[in-house]
Amino acid sequence: MSRNKYEYIILAFLSFLAVLVIWWVATALGLIKPFFLSSPPEVVKAIYQLFESGNFIKDVGISLSRILVGFIVAVLLGVPIGILVGLNRRAEALIEPIVDFVRYTPIPAFIPLFILWFGIGELEKIIVIAASVFFQLVLMVANSVSFTPRQILESAETLGANRWQIVSKVIFPFSKPRIFDDLRVSMGWAWSGLILAEIVGSTSGIGFVIIQSQRLLQTANVIGAIVVIGLLGLFSDIGFKWIYKKLFPWALKLDHYVRN
Amino acid sequence: MLEIKNISKNFLQPDGSIIEAVADISLNVKRDDFVAIVGPSGCGKTTILKLIAGLERPTDGQLIFEDKEIISASQERGIVFQHFSSFPWLSVSENIAFGLRLKNFSEQKVKQIVSHYLKITDLEKFKNTYPANISGGMQQRVAIARTLANDPKILLMDEPFGSLDMQTRSRMQEFLATLWEQNHKTVVFVTHDIEEAIFLADKVILLRQRPAKIKKEYNIKFERPRLHELKFSEEFFNLKRVILKDLEF
């Protein structure tokens, strides 16, 4: 392991530790009442009990499957449309302004409409998740496909590539690492969408556990569930980064390669 | 083979002003000629090459390649850029195979052609390496091999050794001279380095500062094969002196 990486891990660990210490001290000294903020041991206990009861693991599973389906739907629609917007002026004019418009209107504002249109079943939850990701993703991907260096495009052209081949065999492969990184970032919005969908009109999932615990004044459970979400998000981020290295070994030194 | 008739090229700047890059250039390139175009940096040499490639269209005049007007890029006219033009997501051998795969050549034929060019560019050891992990000189050899493998009728080279250190540069020049002597091919080579132009070409065309305009032409008659030592001969020095002088006035 390189020294830089070692340092990174230590610093990352320290920042977590700092938050934990402040939290612990604040609750142990009674500066904040347990009703508002449970102490770390209580939260750990709550997480343990949530899992031990056997129901929480089901809720986590339900949430994960929702997020997976919603995210995949958003990716399947968002990536091709993003590429189109990034490469074609007419598509850009047709799609970008409306995507921008929707992007600035908060998704929570749409939830009453979604419930009206799709009910409170799984479909509505998946649509909320997909909508949370889709509009952001389109714009990120549109930007990500615009970095192929000119001399690479021109080389392909003089090697006999037609317009479609330039997109499929040059621009797409060159942009893949950037697009993959866009997916990693947009996973965060998928989590926001998921919890939102589960807090409003749901009977299962991590979001439901949060809102249910709040109603029953079980603050430790609320915080415990949030910690679990944070950990799952962190794991997915680490997973994305690990897959990136496996899939795109050539991209790791790219900045040195394409300097101009 | 290639006729350039009174071409001019203007570029519109973002502020609305017009830059004249090339003004009224005419030039004939015969089959198997090695022509070097020399001129100061930023004089519009690259623009001429892109016009020949079909990557740019002239504002005025005509470019005729084998009796047909050049209207777009084509695999008949391969180009090698100054740097970083290899496809970074492909290994060295897949870079060389790129044009062949576009033509749907059989796997066996692709393999055969690729291994031939890996051999003549001395890249066999690096065939599975990504371009970012090899030196600048090797990257340029990949670009040359990739273009040659596609068997263009004319090879256009835009300062292909311009970003290399002196030693590598000198070795690459010798490599290209030998390559050309063995596989006769029409080449138009752009450089700002007069020595490089004299060493490689049969014909050197001197351009004046922007807008690019032909100032003078020289026929270079040194015998082939040309080796590095040629650069230290008296005739070479004399010719270099003549051209340098012409460049100044």
Image (spheres, rainbow, N blue to C red):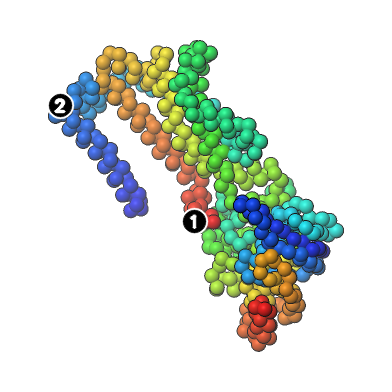
Left or right placement of residue A81 versus residue B48 in this view: left
Which kind of residue does numbered mark 2 sit on? Answer: Gly
Examine the rendered structure and indicate whether residue A83 appears above or below residue A211. below
SS type, badge 1 = helix
Say which label, 1 or 2, has the lower sequence index: 2
Determine the CA span between mark 1 and mark 2: 53 Å
Instruction: Identify the image quadrant of residue B95.
Output: bottom right
Circle 1: is it few (<14), some (14-19), or many (20+) Cα within 10 Å?
few
Left or right placement of residue B54 versus residue A98 in this view: right
Residue linked to disc 2? A30
Left or right placement of residue B218 versus residue A181 in this view: right
What is the x, y in percent for residue A69?
50, 25
Residue A256 is marked as 1
* Subunit under mark 2: A
Q: What residue is drawn where x is 52% and y is 33%?
A: A137
Is residue A176 in view?
no
What is the x, y in percent for residue A185?
45, 36
Mark 1 in CB contact with mark 2 (< 8 angstroms): no
